[in-house]
Amino acid sequence: MNSKRGFFITVLLTAVLLCIAVFGVKIGNFEIKGADQMRYGIDIRGGVEATYEPKDLGRAATENELEAARTIIETRMDAKNITDRDVTIDKGNGKIIVRFPWKSDEADFDPQKAVSELGETARLTFRDPDGNIILEGTDVTKSKAQLSPQDGTPVVTLELSKEGGEKFAEATGRLIGQEISIYMDETLIRSPIVGSRITGGKAEITNLSSTEDAAALASKINSGSLPFSLVVKNCNIISPTLGSSALAVMVMAGKVAFVLVCLFILFYYRLPGLVACIALILQVTGQLLALSVPQFTLTLPGIAGLILSVGMGVDANIIIAERIKEEINTGKTLLRAVEAGFERAFSAVFDGNITVIIIAIILIIFGSGSMLSFGYTLICGVIMNFIAGVTASRVMIRSLGNYKLFRKPQYYGARRQVNDQVL
């Protein structure tokens, strides 16, 4: 975009996105929650502690079974973007203790209601018409709701473990035309009919009424992969470790620091500094949306990742502004100086950001909980740095350079008179 309108279009877009990020928007069933409705971690807003015990197991749960249950609960919470959580095992008493933060729209702070967010904790089984168990929930590695590529109808796909696939192939081979019932404990949730022998460890459940019905069934199957049923014995409210006023103090400190940084780069770099301020606002706005749209839990490590990425954004804009000033001082016209400045600064900005992206990806893949929150905010910030600090800044400076009024050297910190030629 090399027109005079580029600067104003970017500013308008930034203003619109900022309003959405701060105040949110709701159109029908579509909703984006504002910054004050983000989901905050236990350390910032508090949460719930729930103790789970095996239900009607008839024996003490083994350590491997408890570990499997903990892994499934953690995976389920990661899928819901609940990154600030603590799932521990009391091996002596055979209990699982789960701590997690409140939802963003929680108002009555009812721990029993909050626990329901974790989904079913019952044992999932697949049974033949005689009531014999064909598959356990642990035999299902993944369940997903989607549209059939053949006719576009909603279906639920199942991916089975190797052992589960073998058992399912044998069962479907002898039950063609009959029902295989899916139970949560002793509650029947679905009875699909077998159409043919199913091999390869993959299956589809068809004849579902809607996409919502498919999504609900897939969620129940995924949540039923526990090795035994769990029952909540007690729930407690956890107070925020930082105190109720900590969030307000952090927000105020962030605002003051951001304003001071913007004033400095505006005073020192002038026109590129103004562009840098707008780019930083766009970057922070993108990060807020990346947290509020999926309701990703914002923890203290997550805030650290946000601050670090903003610092990298400031660094990128300073490098670009310095390079543009140097190019002007060598005698280039403004737009050539801008192009050369961005090209020569890009390698330094790219090298610094790509190493951070690699670290963030590693944290997201191998980390969980607060480390996942840190990696997520960090990689979102770096991506927004490329979009705002490099691309949007370039559009805005090139746009302003088309105005003769903005070609004066003092606006860029240069020592020599800028050639009035545009190219």
Image: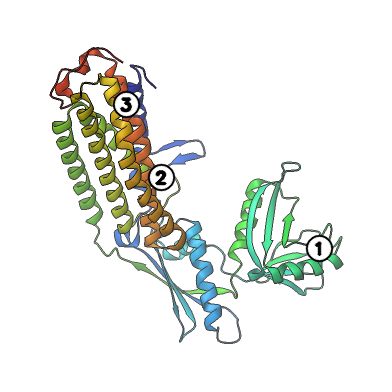
Q: Nearer the viewer, residue 188 or 327?
A: 327
Residue 415 drawn at (x, y percent): 12, 24
Across and down, in percent, residue 127 comes to 75, 70
Residue 191 vs residue 126, the one in the foreground: 126
Residue 197 visible:
yes
**Which residue extends farthest front?**
330
Using the image, determine if residue 15 lies above or below residue 407: below
Residue at left 19%, top 48%?
A: 253
The secondary element bearing badge 2 is classed as helix
Kindly identify which residue carries mark 1: 179
Residue at 71% over, 46% down: 148
Q: Nearer the viewer, mark 1 or mark 3?
A: 3
Task: Give the secondary structure at mark 1.
Answer: loop
Q: Earlier in the sequence, mark 1 or mark 3?
A: 1
> x, y (%) of residue 101?
38, 61
Judge whether residue 21 can be spotted in this image: no
Task: Name the image quarter holding the C terminus.
Answer: top left
Separation (CA) of disc 3 from disc 2: 30 Å
Task: Tell me: residue 294, above or below residue 365.
Answer: above
Q: Label 1: few (<14), some or many (≥20) within 10 Å?
A: some
Q: Is residue 206 left or right of residue 185?
A: right
Residue located beneath label 2 in the image: 290
Q: Which one is closest to the eye, mark 3 or mark 2?
A: 3
Q: Earlier in the sequence, mark 3 or mark 2?
A: 2
Q: Secondary structure at mark 3?
A: helix
Side of 283 where 418 appears, left or right = left
Mark 1 or 2: the one toward you: 2
- In this picture, is 308 found above or below 196? above
Q: Amino acid at mark 2?
A: Ala
